[in-house]
Amino acid sequence: MKVQEMAAEQRKERADAARNRRAILDATSALLAEHGAEGVTMDRVAAAAGVGKGTVFHRFGSRAGLLHELMAEPAFTLMAAITEGPPPLGPGAPAPDRLLAFVDAMITMAADHVELMAASRALALPPHPRTAEIHGTWFGHVATLLREIRPDLDAETAGPLLLSMISTEYAATVARAGGVDRLRASILDIVRSVVRGAPAR
């Protein structure tokens, strides 16, 4: 086989793998939304994605690996957005605007994946291997912004407390009942109250 033909074949394989990965993740999300954790089996995922079960196992290893990938994808996307994306989520906006944009993005991510989080708890999945890195990024980002906005606060403690509102069982219950807008408004109002509490300079 010529070098050009081999390169073309490799590109096709990569493109097929990327399409399969996307189809599998989208199928898993759809099954979670419709059936909850019990609806996510490797057989059902493979059938919904239009691939063989062996393809799902080869790519993700297990149901835990599949759900971990589904959880990590939006987290890493958001991590990239706060470091190199456009403002106000990314650099270049005032700290209060960045804080509100980040909390808003976190609420959206949690609401969009509320069934995934419920499945994680129901199946007693172990933490994602990069959980410490992901959480460290969230807490570090919020602490940095809070130190600029409210130097009178203990930012390392206040930051995680603010974010913890998003991941409570109550927040998940409200989101699953269709109350995402109310949840978002209330959490952002609390964050704004923290921002407005900045001492006069």
Image (cartoon, rainbow, N blue to C red):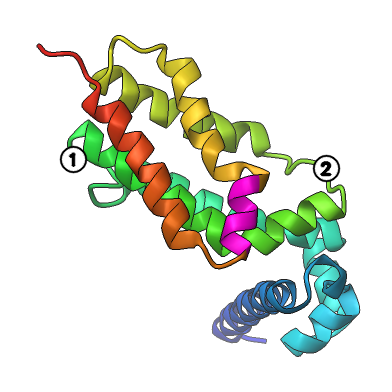
Q: Quadrant of residue 14?
A: bottom right
Name the one closer to the observer, 159 or 129: 159
x, y (%) of residue 188?
36, 44
Question: Dot 1: few (<14), some (14–19), or many (≥20) neighbours within 10 Å?
Answer: few
| Magenta stretch prevailing secondary structure | helix
Q: Amino acid at mark 1?
A: Gly
Question: Dot 2: few (<14), some (14–19), or many (≥20) neighbours within 10 Å?
Answer: few
At horizontal 85% and vertical 82% (from top left) the residue drawn is 44
Camera sees residue 196: yes
**Does 75 sit left or right of 104 as displayed?**
right
At horizontal 83% and vertical 72% (from top left) the residue drawn is 40
x, y (%) of residue 166?
53, 44
Q: Which residue is mark 1?
A: 92
**Does 33 sit left or right of 94 as displayed?**
right
x, y (%) of residue 99?
32, 37
Q: Amino acid at mark 2?
A: Pro
Q: Quadrant of residue 182?
A: bottom left
Q: Which type of secondary structure does the marked residue at label 2 adopt?
A: loop
Mark-to-mark CA distance, 2 and 1: 37 Å
| Whether label 2 touches label 1, CB < 8 Å | no
Q: Vertical placement of 146 versus 41: above or below?
A: above
For the record, the magenta segment spans: 170-176
Camera sees residue 69: no
As for residue 7 lying within the magenta part, the answer is no
At horizontal 42% and vertical 43% (from top left) the residue drawn is 187
Tell which residue pokes out farthest to the left in this image.
Answer: 201
Q: Earlier in the sequence, mark 2 or mark 1?
A: 1
Q: Which residue is mark 2?
A: 126
At horizontal 28% and vertical 40% (from top left) the residue drawn is 98
Name the one closer to the observer, 138 or 9: 138
Name the one closer to the observer, 192 or 44: 192
